[in-house]
Image (cartoon, rainbow, N blue to C red):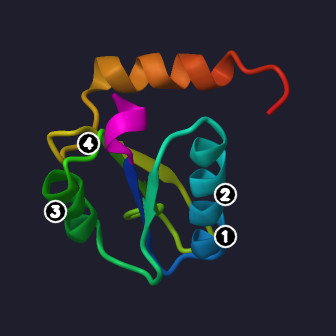
């Protein structure tokens, strides 16, 4: 489904957010997944809207949200335009942690 519907990638004004979002796009593209990457920074609600509007499989927001500005992070949204529920997020984290040589 991800290959058919793609993912939307947005970022905020944090340090290296544009670069991190480009890396996400290149990584999913390597796996044949279409990436909709914003050309400039956008707020999280715009990402949520874009996921639903485009019928995307998921969305990724590069942001540390409420954390101090020296941090950055990776928020994942489902096709319903909401953040992943804890159980699904834990499955994704387990999958990422299982990668030996990122």
Q: Residues within 10 Å of mark 1 (few under 14, many from 20)?
A: few
The CA distance from mark 3 to mark 1 is: 22 Å
Residue 68 point in image, percent of width and height: 51, 69
* Residue with the mark numbered 1: 19
* Residue with the mark numbered 3: 49
Q: As rendered, which of 2 and 99 lies closer to the eye?
A: 2
Residue 13 point in image, percent of width and height: 49, 81
Q: Is residue 16 above or below residue 61?
A: below
Q: Quadrant location of the C terminus?
A: top right
Q: Are marks 3 and 1 in contact (CB under 8 Å)?
A: no
The CA distance from mark 3 to mark 2 is: 22 Å
Mark sitting earlier along the chain (4/2):
2
User: Is 28 covered by the magenta stretch?
Assistant: no
Q: As rendered, which of 71 and 80 lies closer to the eye?
A: 80
**Magenta stretch, overall SS:** helix
The CA distance from mark 4 to mark 2 is: 21 Å
Q: Residues within 10 Å of mark 3 (few under 14, many from 20)?
A: some
* Residue with the mark numbered 2: 23
Residue at 42 percent of width and 73 percent of height: 38
Q: Quadrant location of the N terminus?
A: top left
Q: Magenta span covers which residues?
A: 1-6
Mark sitting earlier along the chain (4/1):
1
Residue at 39 percent of width and 63 percent of height: 65
Mark sitting earlier along the chain (3/4):
3
* Residue with the mark numbered 4: 83
């Amino acid at each position: 489904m991800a290959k058919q519907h793609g993912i939307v990638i947005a970022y905020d004004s944090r340090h290296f957010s544009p670069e991190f979002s480009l890396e996400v796009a290149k990584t999913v593209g390597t796996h044949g997944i279409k990436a909709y990457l914003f050309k400039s920074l956008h707020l999280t609600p715009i990402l949520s809207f874009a996921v639903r509007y485009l019928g995307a499989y998921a969305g990724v927001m590069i942001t540390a949200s409420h954390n101090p500005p020296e941090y950055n992070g990776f928020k994942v949204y489902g096709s319903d335009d909401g953040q992943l529920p804890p159980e699904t997020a834990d499955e994704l984290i387990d999958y990422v942690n299982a990668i030996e040589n990122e």
